[in-house]
Amino acid sequence: MSSRVLVVGVGGIGGTVAGLVSAGCTDASVVGFTTNPQVLASLRDRGYVLDGLGPRREIPAQAVDDLHAVEPFDFIVLAVPPTRVEEAARHAVGALAEHGAMVCLQNGLCEERVSAIAGPERVFGAVVAWGAEMPEPGHFRRTSAGGFFLGRMDGRDDDRLRVLATLLEPVGPVEVTGNLAGARWSKLALNSVVSTLGTIGGDRLGVLMRFRVVRRLALEIITETVAVAHAEGVRLEKVAGSLDLPWLALTEAERAVSGSTSLVAKHTLLLAVGARYRRLRSSMLYALERGREPAVDFLNGEVVTRGRAHGVAAPVNEAAWRRVKALARGDGAPGVAGLHALAAEVALWGA
């Protein structure tokens, strides 16, 4: 049976999803929703223009900027930044079919927020394990390969998940998981490193991970996030099937020395991650460059806030959170010097 899919937010991730599902699922009707007039005009003129990991493709697009006259959709994919997800959900919920589901692609823990709008039975989460950017309106560039972890936050099975998994397979491998919370928290830890340090440092992951101080900051952020996740009762999933965050978390012994065999192993793994995802550029850095609010409240801010509720301190996350907020206020500029300053603030010199 044909499925109707609405993608709300046609940026790097949303445009890639809409374009590849449109091209790869002949029994699906995909509509992109955007209020950006330049993106809308490009989609109507050229369709989805995709490149990055393969040859350039131009895929015909259905695109709208008004949802009042549309037929109900089986799935509404929310591909807007976390800062806009509740607004987008409220705007689109009237276009959701009675037995349909909204799908959160955002980093962070946005399913809870959207459930308050659409109802928990009508909200799925899809953890995005790949990257993309929009270098110009209507042009979507894949920056890394990967697929999705798909599920419900309550862990329950749902036949609709398998339908959605089939729809998303043209984008990349899809794993339906009964532990979406574990996958979400693992991605939260990773994004609290990649997106936040990438924003402060003002460069792509491959460049930044060459600096030892950046890798140590990353390990500290991961360590704190793992501790908060455990306090929440979450069993963390491996990122991309292989990155074991509890193993990466620093022990007290490792924090007390400037070097050890285990620390070398963890730094080496982060170097490999930086090499594999060397083209990744922080979405929050793009937001800053465009004068938009960075989503750090949904990343490091979430770790700090939830940690406080459990009495678990997260000082490196908190310092990084404050630094991104300062950049958003125009206090300083992104650059590696900001990461050295962050390390000095949290007393990590020589670590």
Image (cartoon, rainbow, N blue to C red):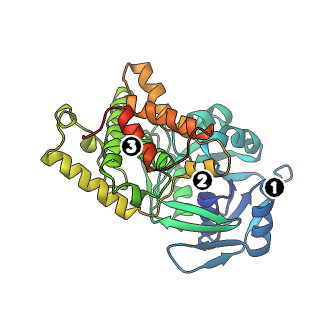
The residue positioned farthest toward the bottom in the image shown: 55
Pointer 2 with pointer 1, Cβ within 8 A: no
The residue positioned farthest toward the right in the image shown: 69
Image-quadrant location for residue 257: top left
Q: Is residue 74 above or below residue 54?
A: above
Q: Secondary structure at mark 3?
A: helix
Report the disc number at residue 65.
Answer: 1
Report crowding for label 2: few under 14, some 14 to 19, many 20 or more residues within 10 A (C-alpha).
Answer: some
| Amino acid type, mark 2 | Tyr
Look at 50% across and 57% down and name the residue there: 281
Residue 148 image offset from top left, x and y in percent: 47, 56
Residue 72 image offset from top left, x and y in percent: 76, 51
Instruction: State how far apart marks 2 and 1 are (Cα).
Output: 23 Å
Q: Earlier in the sequence, mark 3 or mark 1?
A: 1
Q: Is residue 151 above or below residue 133?
A: above
Report the disc number at residue 286.
Answer: 2
Look at 35% across and 44% down and name the residue there: 218
Look at 19% across and 41% down and name the residue there: 258
Q: Secondary structure at mark 1?
A: loop
| Amino acid type, mark 1 | Asp
Q: Earlier in the sequence, mark 2 or mark 1?
A: 1
Q: Secondary structure at mark 2?
A: helix
Q: Is residue 27 above or below residue 190?
A: below
Quadrant where the C terminus sits is top left
Residue 146 image offset from top left, x and y in percent: 44, 62
Viewer-side label of 2, 3: 3
Q: Can residue 18 be seen?
A: yes
Between 135 and 95, which is closer to the camera in this rendering? 135
| Amino acid type, mark 3 | His
Instruction: State how far apart marks 2 and 3 are (Cα).
Output: 21 Å
Viewer-side label of 2, 1: 2
